[in-house]
């Protein structure tokens, strides 16, 4: 059921580690990186809730409810990954990122709901932590391939301005293959549970509406769902505001950070950033399922808050380590935090939202992810340039402070007390 997440997250792994170096290769300045990444927040904000609402009201005896959407998304993502390293100029790469993000978001949201649809409540924690395991595995493979191919084919060649190194091509080709094949495996091997009689009646009623009303229906569903949203989701939105703002800073500025703290060129710094991601996703892979009994024993909010605090400590430490091997040590804490972020909130939300509206609420949860990212892409370029002195060290410390705030806010999460507004 979760195998398709391997391909989706391989693609996200490339976005986290390889996309920003490619922008730098093609002539972007460091303070441009936040705005160049605006595609992710905008497409996530628009695509995921709409696709979620549409998938709630979809059923095909042959293709199911969620599968058509993440299959089309995987195909779009696969084509973009194949083309990305061939970008001749910066604007072309930025355009491809927009299309890639549409595909990834179309695949991601119904996949989250798909797992919730299939599992009884007692297995939700295990299901979403297994999803977290595949998140780690996909990103691990993506970053491992970058490190491996630079080692095998990068050599000691000098960077050529305006040119993407050929050793980076191979990671994208693998991503194009995995994006489609892993999704196909889940589509072909995992049957969906048919809708109830009441759900089927509502789906049939929707088919009888005019085209205009059918197009408007997902937007109406989103507005209604927000009006009736559990208070718990508003609280988790506050956590996400700081958590995802900080994560976007980390992904954008690890390469510039190592150019400053270790004196690397762009290729060397990108490789070091890939090693960091390789390390923390290895930890995620190892601890994801171990978090299940811990959350059952101590409660999700405590484990989540402690994990976020550990991530903050990791980011406070990284800028002061100049040894390329010792700087991997804080990634243990980061990996534990990433495992918690990718599993625990989805388990919590699945328990407090109606099953028949899980798709739209997972889409709204993703809005809470992309809104902070959108704010970051618009605001952090100026913050970085004018308040943080164009200094990547200060950017990383800023992100650490935001993770500490997110940890404090996570202590307010309580699934049992969640009520409908």
Image (cartoon, rainbow, N blue to C red):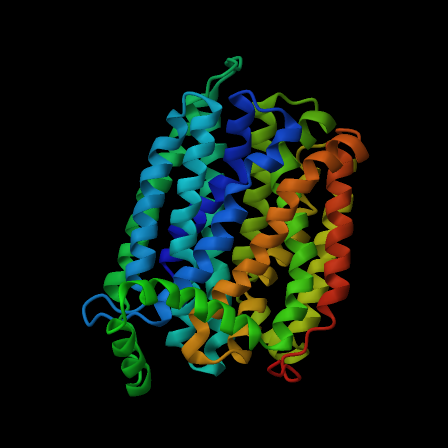
- Spot occupied by residue 100 in the image (x, y as percentages of width and height): 41, 42
**Residue 265 to residue 119: above or below:** above
For this orientation, the residue located farthest to the bottom is 197
x 51%, y 34%: residue: 18
Residue in the foreground of this view, choosing between 15 and 46: 46
**Residue 37 to residue 121: above or below:** above
Q: Is residue 319 at all visible to an observer of this figure?
A: no
x 44%, y 75%: residue: 357
Residue in the foreground of this view, choosing between 281 and 111: 111
Quarter where residue 340 is shown:
bottom right
Q: Is residue 151 left or right of residue 385?
A: left
x 19%, y 72%: residue: 61
Q: Is residue 401 left or right of residue 89?
A: right
Residue in the foreground of this view, choosing between 48 and 82: 48
Q: Is residue 330 left or right of residue 100?
A: right
- Spot occupied by residue 314 in the image (x, y as percentages of width and height): 72, 48
- Spot occupied by residue 165 in the image (x, y as percentages of width and height): 45, 21
Q: Quadrant of the N terminus?
A: bottom left
Q: Is residue 239 left or right of residue 107?
A: right
x 51%, y 21%: residue: 26
Quarter where residue 66 is shown:
bottom left
């Amino acid at each position: 059921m979760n195998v398709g997440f391997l391909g989706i997250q391989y693609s996200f792994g490339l976005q986290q580690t390889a996309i920003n170096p490619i922008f730098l290769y093609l002539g972007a300045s460091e303070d441009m990186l936040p705005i160049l990444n605006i595609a992710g927040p905008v497409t996530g904000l628009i695509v995921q809730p709409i696709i979620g609402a549409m998938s709630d009201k979809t059923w095909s005896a042959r293709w199911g409810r969620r599968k058509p959407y993440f299959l089309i998304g995987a195909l779009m993502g696969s084509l973009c990954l194949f083309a990305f390293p061939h970008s001749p100029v910066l604007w072309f790469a930025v355009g491809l990122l927009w299309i890639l993000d549409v595909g990834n978001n179309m695949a991601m949201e119904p996949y989250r709901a798909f797992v919730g649809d299939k599992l009884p409540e007692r297995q939700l924690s295990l299901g979403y932590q297994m999803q977290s395991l595949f998140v780690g595995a996909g990103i691990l493979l993506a970053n491992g391939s970058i490190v491996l191919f630079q080692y095998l084919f990068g050599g000691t060649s000098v960077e050529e301005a305006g040119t993407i190194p050929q050793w980076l091509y191979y990671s994208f080709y693998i991503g194009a293959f995995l994006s489609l094949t892993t999704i196909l495996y889940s589509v072909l091997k995992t049957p969906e549970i048919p809708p109830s009689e009441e759900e089927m009646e509502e789906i049939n009623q929707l088919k009888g509406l005019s085209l205009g009303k059918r197009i408007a229906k997902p937007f109406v569903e989103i507005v209604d769902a927000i009006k009736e949203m559990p208070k718990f989701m508003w609280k988790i939105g506050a956590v996400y505001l700081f958590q995802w703002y900080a994560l976007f800073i980390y992904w954008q500025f690890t390469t510039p950070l190592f150019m400053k703290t270790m004196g690397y060129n762009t290729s060397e710094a990108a490789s070091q950033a890939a090693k960091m991601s390789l390390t923390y996703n290895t930890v995620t892979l190892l601890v994801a399922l171990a978090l299940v009994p811990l959350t059952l024993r101590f409660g999700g909010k405590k484990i989540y808050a402690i994990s976020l605090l550990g991530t903050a400590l990791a980011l406070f430490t990284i800028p002061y380590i100049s040894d390329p091997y010792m700087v991997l040590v804080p990634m243990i804490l980061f990996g534990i935090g990433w495992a918690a972020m990718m599993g625990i909130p989805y388990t919590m939300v699945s328990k407090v939202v109606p099953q028949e509206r899980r798709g739209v609420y997972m889409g709204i949860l993703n809005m809470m992810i992309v809104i902070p990212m959108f704010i970051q892409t618009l605001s952090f370029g100026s913050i970085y340039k004018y308040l943080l002195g164009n200094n990547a060290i200060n950017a990383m410390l800023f992100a650490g402070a935001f993770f500490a705030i997110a940890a404090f806010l996570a202590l307010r999460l309580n699934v049992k007390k969640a009520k409908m507004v």
